[in-house]
């Protein structure tokens, strides 16, 4: 039986820095650390730059058998043929994303520290949920803290993969995996 895309939500999940990207540098990180999933997160208003970077990253991910996820932007995800999209609570719903992107697409949803949001995301068709910040984060210093005990509880109640995010480094990632995370998302710990 073939492995579905959401069954590939495991291991190291890289999130690109919020700046103009050095694609060669990103490729070196993917190969050096066996990044399984890469999320493109660039909060620029320059749509052409976003489109160009997303297309380059998609090709890079295909070359390295890495899942390619676009942050927040369902239209960009669809346009470049990414594997899926990651949505925050203020973005479109998982139901809307699923309708637009189809049943094969990966839909990730941020649930912060709330199991109720994760249960709702799963019912709405999400492929995975993200909890965090697990540790103090330099990227989002004011992010809500999510205790590892929340991950342990969520693991017993939901059937889709859990991604731990926020301050995750190579030094503390085992704590997140031991709590029940299928994947850990890194930005600063990976790209700085």
Image: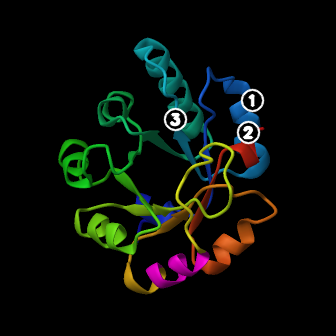
Q: Residue at x 54, y 82 (%)?
A: 152
Q: Position of residue 8 (x, y in %)?
A: 50, 61
Q: Position of residue 120 (x, y in %)?
A: 27, 68
Q: Residue at x 17, y 48 (%)?
A: 99
> Quick one: 104 or 114, which is closer to the camera?
114
Q: Secondary structure at mark 2?
A: helix
Looking at the image, is mark 1 or mark 3 earlier in the sequence? 1
Asked if residue 163 lies left or right of residue 86, the reply is right
Residue picked out by circle 2: 191
Is 85 contained in the magenta span? no
Q: CA distance from mark 1 to mark 3?
A: 16 Å
Q: Which mark is residue 25?
A: 1
Q: Position of residue 31 (x, y in %)?
A: 74, 44
> Quick one: 40 or 45, which is closer to the camera?
45
Quadrant for the C terminus in the image:
top right
Characterize the local packing of mark 2: few (<14), some (14-19) or many (20 or more) Cα atoms within 10 angstroms.
few
Q: Quadrant of residue 127?
A: bottom left
Q: CA distance from mark 1 to mark 2?
A: 9 Å
Whether label 1 touches label 2, CB < 8 Å: yes
Between marks 1 and 2 in the image, the one whose residue lies nearer the viewer: 2
Asked if residue 124 lies left or right of residue 143, the reply is left
Quadrant for the N terminus in the image:
bottom left
Q: Secondary structure at mark 1?
A: helix
Residue picked out by circle 3: 41
> Which region is colored magenta?
148-154
Q: Quadrant of residue 79?
A: top left
> Quick one: 127 or 47, which is closer to the camera?
47
Is 150 contained in the magenta span? yes
Between marks 1 and 3 in the image, the one whose residue lies nearer the viewer: 3
């Amino acid at each position: 039986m073939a492995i579905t895309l959401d069954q590939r939500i495991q291991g190291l999940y890289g999130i690109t820095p919020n700046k103009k990207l050095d694609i060669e540098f990103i490729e070196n990180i993917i190969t050096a650390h066996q990044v399984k999933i890469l999320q493109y997160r660039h909060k620029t208003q320059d749509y052409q730059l976003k489109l160009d970077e997303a297309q380059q990253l998609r090709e890079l991910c295909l070359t390295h058998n890495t899942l390619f996820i676009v942050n927040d932007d369902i239209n960009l995800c669809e346009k470049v043929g990414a594997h899926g999209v990651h949505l925050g609570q203020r973005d479109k719903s998982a139901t809307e994303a699923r309708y637009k992107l189809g049943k094969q697409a990966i839909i990730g949803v941020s649930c912060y520290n709330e199991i109720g949001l994760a249960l709702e995301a799963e019912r709405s068709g999400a492929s995975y949920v993200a909890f965090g910040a697990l540790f103090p984060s330099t990227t989002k210093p004011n992010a809500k803290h999510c205790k590892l005990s929340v991950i342990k509880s969520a693991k017993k109640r939901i059937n889709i993969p859990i991604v731990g995010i926020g301050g995750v480094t190579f030094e503390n990632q085992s704590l997140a995996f031991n709590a029940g995370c299928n994947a850990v998302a890194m930005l600063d710990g990976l790209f700085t």
